[in-house]
Amino acid sequence: MKKSLIRTMSALVVAVMALTSCATGNQAPADAGTTGGNGADTTAPADGGGQAASDVRDELIFLTGAFPVTLDPVMMNDHPSAQIRLMIFETLVSLNPRTMELEPGLAVSWDFEDAQTLNMELRQGVYFSNGDPFTADDVSFTIERAIESTHTRSMFEMIEYVEIHDDHNITLHLSEPFMPILHTLSTGQLGIVNANVARELGFDGFHENPVGTGRFIFDSQVLGDRTVVVRNENYWGELPHLRQITFRVIPEQPIRFIEVETGNADIGFSILPTDVQRAEETDSVVLHRHLNFSYNYIGFNTASGPLADIRVRQAIAHALQLQPIIDNAFAGTGMPGTGPLTTLHDMSIATEPFEFDLDRSRELLAEAGFPDGLSLRFWTNAGNQARADVAQLVQSQLRQVNIDVEVEIIEWGTYLEATAAGEHDMFMLGWISQPDPHFGVDMLFHSRNVGAPGNRSFTVNAEIDRLIEEGKGELDPVRRAQIYADLQNAIREELPHIFLHFGEELIVTTPEVRGFFPAPTGSPWLWEVYFE
Amino acid sequence: MHKFILKRLGMMLPVLVGVMFVIFTLTYITPGDPVMMILGDQAAQEDIVNLRAELGLDQPFLVQFGMFVANTMQFNFGTSFTTGRPVLEEIGFRFPTTMQLAAMSVVISVLIGIPLGILSAVKQYTIFDNGATIIGLLGVSIPNFWLGMMLIILFSVNLGWFPTTGFETPMHWVLPSFTIGISSAAIIMRMTRSSMLEVIRQDYIRTARAKGQKESKIIVSHALKNALIPVITVVGLQFGLLLGGAILTETIYAIPGLGRFMVESIQRRDYPIIQGGVLLLALVFSFVNLLVDILYAFVDPRIRSQYK
């Protein structure tokens, strides 16, 4: 009996050990999921802040919310990928996050020959991290590649072709007048890739061995966990203070906060608005906040249902008080929306607000044929507490004018599909754009982008379309500003959205971190960071 | 015994084919378009159509399913829609971490649950028994994500004993394993208690006592072994639940495991990853069930004789 009991227990132990050893077997340093790049020795610190051999720390741990989908510039549209890409690749034109001004990047100067022709002089003496010199061929190849990729084609197809004059002079020929082209050239998806390497590796191979001219070099990656970049010692400009940056994935926002608070990491990206007060009160973290380009809106289905009537949309606008919604759903961070373009956009104006007036709201509903009120569905996506809170607050506020709002929280994929198909009444979404005003209005309000591309309010308004087209082709900045002012007022009149909220970057660092600026673009210039 | 194991292995095949059909159908009928997830909101219609064709998503259901089965038979699970990496590489890297987490949680739940269950049964209706019952109830009721957060605040932030996130060193393993293991420990404790109570009232135990055997020997050698059969069943089932429980725990502790990855893949509608991952988990669960059946034979000679 004793013998068989021992046998039984041994079997249990062996089974557990087998499972565990199977698990630890793949944890070896050279594991299958670790991809090495073209850098030097690169074992990422197991935990805690990296400590250099010298007294001054030069290794930084940056916490982000998700693992980058890919490091190939033309294959990504997610935030974590963009943050790392900014370290490895450079663009022709660079957007300074502090000033929001466009600065020379890999192009040292440019001039518009006309609204469809842009001459650019490229920087000389620049080398890729593998030692290849940077030339006009790399620019031409990068742009052609971006147009070829299904992921980015629609963003860059206005570039008809690149004319190469010599190794450092090119002309971009556009298919139509497109003034936001400089901002387009500053987007991460047009990070200049090494043509030789990308040609050789193709789309499938380049993301595992990305070669750019940036201040850092891709070093290694542990799937689902971290990406390490190391300083490019042969960088053409001023070398970064940091020798190594580790981008670690911590999906939960409160845990990112805790990791910085306890000193296990240096920078925690995007904390919860509800943690702001705690961050301000504690000495162990420094809170960095800055308005960003995120615009949160309540959308109406202007094509069908009761909301197709402008008076119903106006009635809702008159019945809502935005500040209490922002105080509750966003813990007071950011600011109430003042129009379709955030205050950071060039040429944004504060449109005339809809006065809170319940009598006027009831009047408008009666005029629209709903004297006794009506029922509407408000959709939002699962997994976003702020949006769920907004939905409930809107529900409660609209009850005062007899609008019965039924809140439905829907899984993200289903939500995108259903709102693209126009099955909704009201919905909530956000839009993150770039400084040029074109990017804040084209996808959301142009009739050619109805449905999945972004115009989920199904706005079809000839005046809005005309102003968007005029705005993107206007060379004169004064006339252009007037066009965008008219456009913002026209959108306000059409009222496809309640301009709810302009967001804010909320980032925590340890007190030792210096030189950090919370870039409104969501991708901070980490090469400016150093330790005290 | 060998015959039995081979027979059981053979029976796993139809189970896996069934799993393949169910998971493929579910992913097919679930709303949400993977192409939109990949290309994002700003994609042009032309690109959407092209990519859909590229991924084979424009084919009829039966054609897609047929291709899926044929490829799976050749161990070709395809590449991830979003990252472009082979499914086997993506899953293969994360799977061992999740298995390790689940295995350690089982060990913890067994080490806590069985001794507490035995003591509860032996000391029935005492303060210890009532206390263990309350702890058990709490263990089952506390949600994983809440317990995980509380353990982090207490042991990582306030006491500084364990690291908050990651899975690199044994110190990293402690909190996540406990987070998952505690609820299972409570279930195993309750099962061990009731099973032991049933056994220690039987005649042969009374006979053993009458023969003057030591109480500890009676409990361990005579009672526990007979009480173990239902406990083993529960432990086996718990293993499957622990694999599921890993999803939340991996998110809280930022562990790059399969559970978290599966949730991310479902959100992105990354069909090859979802299908490959579910198939792998079904295979693991089938193996654990087989292991449970084999353990029955080790524990109970009557069952062993049936296997011959």
Image: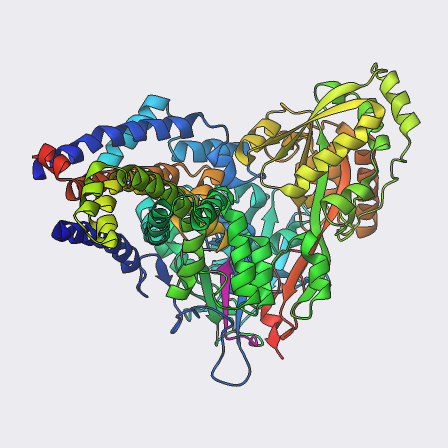
- Quarter of the image for residue B61 reads top left
Front residue of B97 and A425? B97
Front residue of A368 and A174? A368
- Quarter of the image for residue A255 reads bottom right
Query: Would you place residue B49 above or below residue B220 in this image?
Result: above
Q: Position of residue A208 (x, y in %)?
A: 39, 57
Q: What stretch of residues is rendered in magenta?
A: A239-250
* Residue found 66% across the figure and 37% down from its top: A388
Q: Position of residue A171 (x, y in %)?
A: 59, 55
B16 left or right of A296?
left
Residue A247 falls inside the magenta stretch: yes
Query: Would you place residue A71 above or below residue B260 in this image?
Result: below
Q: Residue A329: tell me if it is visible.
A: yes
* Residue found 80% across the figure and 26% down from its top: A399
Query: Would you place residue B109 above or below residue A299 in this image?
Result: below
Front residue of A93 and B166? B166
Q: Residue A86: tell me if it is visible.
A: no
A520 left or right of B38?
right
Q: Residue furthest top?
A: A369
A289 left or right of B116?
right
Q: Position of residue A232 (x, y in %)?
A: 48, 73
* Residue found 60% across the figure and 60% down from its top: A257
Looking at the figure, which quarter contains the C terminus of chain A?
A: bottom right
Residue B77 falls inside the magenta stretch: no
